[in-house]
Amino acid sequence: MSNLATIPIEYYLVFCSVLFCIGVFGVLIKRNALVILMSIELMINSINLLLAAFSAYTNDPAGQIFVFFIMVVAAAEVAIGLAIVVLIYRTTHSIDIDVLNKLKW
Amino acid sequence: MKLILILIPLLPLLGFLFLGLGFKSIPKKVTSIVGPGTILASFILSIITFIHLTQQAGTQSSLFPHSDVYTLFSWISIGSLDISFSFLIDPLSVLMLLVVTGVGFLIHVYSVGYMKDDPGYNRFFAYMNLFVFFMLLLVMGANYPIMFIGWEGVGLCSYLLIGFWFKNHEYNNAANKAFIMNRIGDLGFLLGMFLLFTTFQSLNYQDIFSQAKGMTSGNGTLVAITLLLFIGAVGKSAQIPLYTWLPDAMAGPTPVSALIHAATMVTAGVYMIARSNILYVLSPATMEIIGITAITTALFAASIAIFQNDIKKILAYSTISQLGYMFAALSIGAFTGAMFHLTTHAFFKALLFLAAGSVIHAIGGGQDIRNMGGLRKKLPKTYWTFLIATLAIAGIPPFSGFFSKDEILSKAFEFNHVTWFALAVGAFMTAFYMFRLFYLTFFRAFRGTEEEKHHLHESPAVMTTPLIVLSVLAAIGGVLNIPVLFGGENWLSGFLAPVFADAMAVKVQPAALSHATEWLLMATTLAGCLVTIFWAWRRYVKQENGLLPDEAKRSLLVQLISKKYYIDELYDFVFVKPSLWCSRYLHQVVELRFIDRIVNGVGQVVIWTGNTVRYVQTGNVGFYMFIMILGIILILFFNILI
Amino acid sequence: MTTIISITILGILVLFLGIQKKQSWLLPVILVGLATSMILTILDWNTARSYYHEMLIIDKTSVAFSLVLIFSTFLIFSLASHYYRGVERPLDDIYGVMIFALVGAVMMTSYGNLIMLFLGIETLSIALYVLAGSHKEAITSNEATLKYFLLGSFLSGFLLFGIALIYGSTGSFDLQKISVFVAACHGIYPPMFLAGLFLLIIGLAFKIAIAPFHFWAPDVYEGTPTLLTAFMATVVKTASIVAMYRFFTHTFYGIHGVWETTIWILAVLTMLLGNLTGLYQPNLKRMLAYSSISHSGYMLLAVVAFSPMSNNALLFYTLSYSIATILAFAILILIREAHGNDYFSSLNGMAKTNPLEAFCLTIAMLSLTGIPPLAGFMAKYYLFTTALEKGLLWLVLVAIAGSAISVAYYFKPIMAMYLKESNEVKLNVGRSYKVHLMFMTLLVILIGVLPFLVMGIL
Amino acid sequence: MLTILLILLPLALSLIILIFKEEKAIRQFALAGSLIEFGVGVAAFIQYKTSCHCNLLFTTDWLATLGVSLKFGMDGISLLLVMLTTFLLPIIILASFNHAYSRPSAFYSLILLMEMALIGVFTSFDGLIFYIFWELALIPAYFICAVWGGDDRIRITFKFFIYTFVGSLFMLVALIYLYFRTPLPHSFDFQGLYAVRLNPGEQTWIFLAFFLAFVVKIPIFPFHTWQPDTYSGAPATGSMLLAGIMLKMGLYGMIRWMIPICNDAVQEWGGVAMILAITGIVYASLIAIRQNDMKRLIAYSSIAHVGLIAAGLLSLTTYAMQGAVIQMVSHGINIVGLFIIIDLIEQRTKTRNISNLGGIARTAPRLAIFFMLFLLASIALPLTNSFVGEFLLLLGLFEYSAIFAAVAGLTIIFSAVYMLWMYQRTMLGKANEFTENIHDLTWTEMAALVPLVVMVFWIGMFPGLFLNVALPDVMQILNYTK
């Protein structure tokens, strides 16, 4: 704990935010479904880290427990996501998200 | 008494309902009895009323003496507005009753013969009865609204009867014209009533007049009221500028012209003003306007009459000018004179029309006097009666017209000399065109076609009897009011005096004329008339070519006059065409292109927006994400950093 | 609590039946199960209590809304047999997933802790990702699920970040504790907390399909199998709006001023966009998607103006909206089945061929428009009064303008059905289905005419 | 109790009639039902006591939480309009018999439903309930006109619907606003709403909201453009319902809600509104002169007539108000009569264009006579019903402003112009290929027309009964403006 306390919480905050933003930009810039999926994962993980940090600093286990929940959910999400990507690939033979826009207007 | 009064108008109404509802099923015989019968009955009843009235003269203690008000039921009553269905019986209304029912009856009888072969026989008598009903309401009503009911009712009947032969659109147009012009007047009447009500809080004659008595002469409101009412009179009695419907109204069957457009309806205006004499006496400004209008009309119409060739049109214009006379009389406060002339005019003008009718009947439809002539031998009865009527209207003693005209003229002279002169000239013109008509119709050889010549025959007794009766009346009608000059005692003046008492009291009486002057005036007018008659004789009986002056030779003025001063064309150009154009413009441009387009425009704008907005939905995930992030950033930005 | 448990058991039961290859039992079991869970839920009425350290808080509001959710699901399921008729693949998975989605939805109505909120949302969403794509062969279905998944998980990331920030600043996930913190800081709120708050709002706004986070809705609705679209349009929307509402009332009522304007603007944006965009849609399904968007705009009114009345209003609104929408979708299913598409032109002359269905759809449309005396009118009226009571005159005016515009597109199907020449295609409808339609129609009318049955029970 | 019966009976009938299959039965049922309804109306008329201001009251809670209660009753004005509705309905139904409408059960069911809604509008004394019925009336009207209407009906009727719907939304806002201004516990009860004291600004807004709603319905220039299209596009029955009864809703709304609630604003802005109305009179009359479609002509004439009524109402004088009430009834009777006549002509000649017609008076004299009677009534000839109304209206207007009265009075002339023109071109003249061999009125047709004619002359000659019924309540309404 003590050595951890030497790093001020703001650092964690900034670091995680940056990570999160990287994830967001990844989502925005990339057209490849898989990469987007990974970016989303990055976002979520940054949040996990943040939560962990907070819980450590407030000595409140809830945060870390929540992190586990998130991991579970994220896993499920990814599983579904990959399934969907596979599905898309079957039909369109590409995983570019722009290929599919039949539905509009 | 009350019952009698109710019956007087009710009988014609019942007649109408019977004939109207019975429709085609009723045999002509029945109709010929019911039609005139109802009128005869109410004529008799009117006489009874008359007697009753003369007997109880002076025994009355109501607001103005010799008058009774009989209320049947309350019609519209809200707060202070209480219009009851009530009849007023006083000398004035009784006089009108007698004229309407009497002349009306004769004309009905005449019609039995005249309309004999018409398919719409029953319809005709139904309408005629209805007309009499409304006319009686008009004269008997004890307040303005009741008069207005009659006022509009007679208008309706005149519409129906002018367009009686409705297959011909010319006639229908004439009918519409008549109704609409009357309506213009009626609006004036209506507004007049409103102003009356707002001023006097009542519409009953008695309340109004008794209050009006107290008001100062020249009171602005009174002037307004009288003017508005006068507009009504102008419309109904065919004065300038609303006279053009009357000549066209000749489209109707001749008895109609006789009854409605000569004897009774058109004189309603005169009656109305005579009825509201007090109001008019108290507003000199109006009186002047009336005077000017009346005299102009008298001369104007007379001048047109001179150059007309349609026998009925001539009589129509002469009616207009005679009505002008009556209004002139009213305008100088000679109410008795006006009513006197109204009565005599009813006699001789009805007679003229009926006689003309019998002429037309004889010829078989033709109305152009240029194709007549020499009928003296063929139709003696008609000839004589027509002669009497003509003499009467021309003001030749001792026929009725002479006395009535003379009274007006002398009163006019009292009033001012210009008026007198104008009216005198009018008298001369009248004499001229009437005798022109007379000569062209009855003298010289017949100018019509051959089969017309064969067709020529005297009308049946059923038609000629009324002619004779009327001619008697036209001849001796003058006795009603023989002036003191001839040792008479001005019976009519005496009879009507109570009605006009208040007015006379208010009115500034000019110095009465000396007998000498009266003789002089009489002589002058008489001489003038005789001269014009002689001239007419020279021109139309003696002179060969004078008969049918060819158009080319006519001077511009004459052509102008013979084209009736192009008044119809003028109205058409000034009122009819613009309003039609306006109608089209409003509909095509304002309505469709402007208002409606704005309404639709709103909707279209919304839809257009919707159509454009929906293209934001590109269906591209990346784009969606981008917008979302934008949204997130904006929200965070505005909520946290600011 | 019993609700969640019972439904979960039901879900497991369904899967079990699936393993047992008892396809024919599925629907009866589900309907019965849902009915029983409804009864169980009603039993919780008036017993306001919380479970597991305020993880779940069961109170009147949550019970009422859970009932609405279950009831909607019930209605949807009773359409299922007709919808999936002739499909030979086993359906236990789809049904099961739907039921689990319902569990998530119910959790969202009764959470007492942000963790539960998150879990609820995710349970719902993940289930829906599956459902959206459940029609594997159809490319539209694939597209729908892809879009939904990407956007959904992306936004849930933000939601999560929001929760994290709130946790960071308040030190707890518990709504009670958070509200204590809020009360403690007397109007000066740390930016981190605010950021968290708004990210949370945004996360929910996405689920409710509030502009500008509504873009997924039309596409996904159109692509998703119709039955499940109905599920999305009703259950998901209701659950999310309730979640948002709950979370404001339980925690953030103190700082009304902070978020009011934002929601205000979002509401206006949503109502206008939804209605305007709806105007030009060529087909019924997509039109309904936009209508649902605009309706979520109206629902926001209840959130903006939260007062004792507003949860009532929201309840009434969600109920009447759900029923009408499901009714519309029920007809839509028939049309798609008969014509293969759902363009308005396919509705032409339906009044002649299928008067009953035409009538039902008309009622649904009129109710959604808000024509008295149908449920929709009372709902809107109730909502607007609550808003006006808070003096949100302009917001209400916008809403009214919106519903005026909406007439234009809600009348499209009506005009098509009654006024256009018939295209002689008869929808084949089973008796039970007919009964079901009539039942829903009757409900729409009844709730409108006797609103006091529902109104003011909270 | 009678009041609620009046409302529920048509509803029940409209549901029952759906079970009938063959047309004859449906028609007879509809006719019989509407006659029974009329009977109930008469009963109400008999039970009615002029003494108390809200007769036959029926009150019960509906939404206690929102202060909405089912409060139905009648004062003189509502009574007259209810009588009008119940009286006209059988006639309208009877007149519809010579049409072979498709799906008759639906058709007559809608008509009866509409009757229910209309009576609801006229008898409800609770703001929200009033609004609900107001909107409810729109739906059957829309469907009647849209489904059984003529060509281009889709566009026309939709315009009609959305126009009036949007208009009435303003009223809803106004009502809710007022509701919140009532003392706690808020309520929509009319007395409560009357009692609300608003500051001038609010008054103006509320006035505008109400005015917009009513003015579109009535309709008054320049919000009238939906009306000629709708009347001419609608089926005969539809136009009768719209013109004869539905249009009165707006005027009634003015009397019942607008004038008492925002009286100051009415006094302040009434002038402007009246100018609109009077402009409408002249405008519509002028347009009517040139119309070729008889229905359109009548539509425009109706704009002129109701313009006069509205102007009279806004003048806030006893006479005009009374006249308005009477004229609402008279106009309903006359215009239905005219529409019936036009419908009969169209039935026989398959055309409605004045230019195609003529000479009917010879081939079908009875028809011509009835036409003439209604024509005379609608040009306000004395002793017909609308003379009483227009006389009072103009008198009241005159008290307010002579100029207004003079301009509004032009309607007397114009109406004569276009009506006579129409009559001449259709009835008179020579018969042509359209009109040569048309048959005269049948007995059923007479049965539909005669009662109307009777009313025309009854009200025309003995208006006392009707005036007295309405008088106390008119005074009451006017008291609020004092």
Image (cartoon, rainbow, N blue to C red):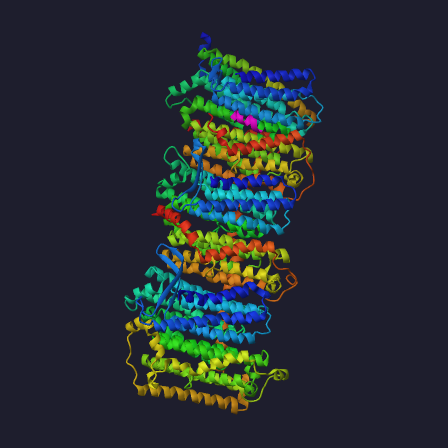
Report the magenta residues as a range. Answer: C233-240
Q: Nearer the viewer, residue A57 or C34?
A: C34
Q: Nearer the viewer, residue D396 or D29?
A: D29
Does residue C238 appear in the picture of this structure?
A: yes
Please provide percent x and percent y for residue A33: 62, 24
Q: Quadrant of residue D63?
A: top left
Tag count: 0
Which residue lies at the image location 50% right of the left edge and 68% below the top edge? B129
Which residue lies at the image location 54% right of the left edge and 57% below the top edge? D297
Depicted D256 relative to depicted D63: above or below = below
Left or right placement of residue D55 versus residue B109 in this view = left
Does residue B585 appear in the picture of this structure?
A: no
Please provide percent x and percent y for residue C435: 63, 30
Left or right placement of residue B154 versus residue D477 in this view = right
Q: Assess whether residue A11 is covered by the magenta stretch.
A: no
Q: Assess whether residue C235 is covered by the magenta stretch.
A: yes
Q: Nearer the viewer, residue B200 or A89?
A: B200
Depicted C396 relative to depicted B352: above or below = above
Please provide percent x and percent y for residue B580: 52, 63
Please provide percent x and percent y for residue C117: 51, 20
Outermost residue toward the top?
Answer: A2
The rendered magenta stretch, by its main secondary structure, is classed as helix
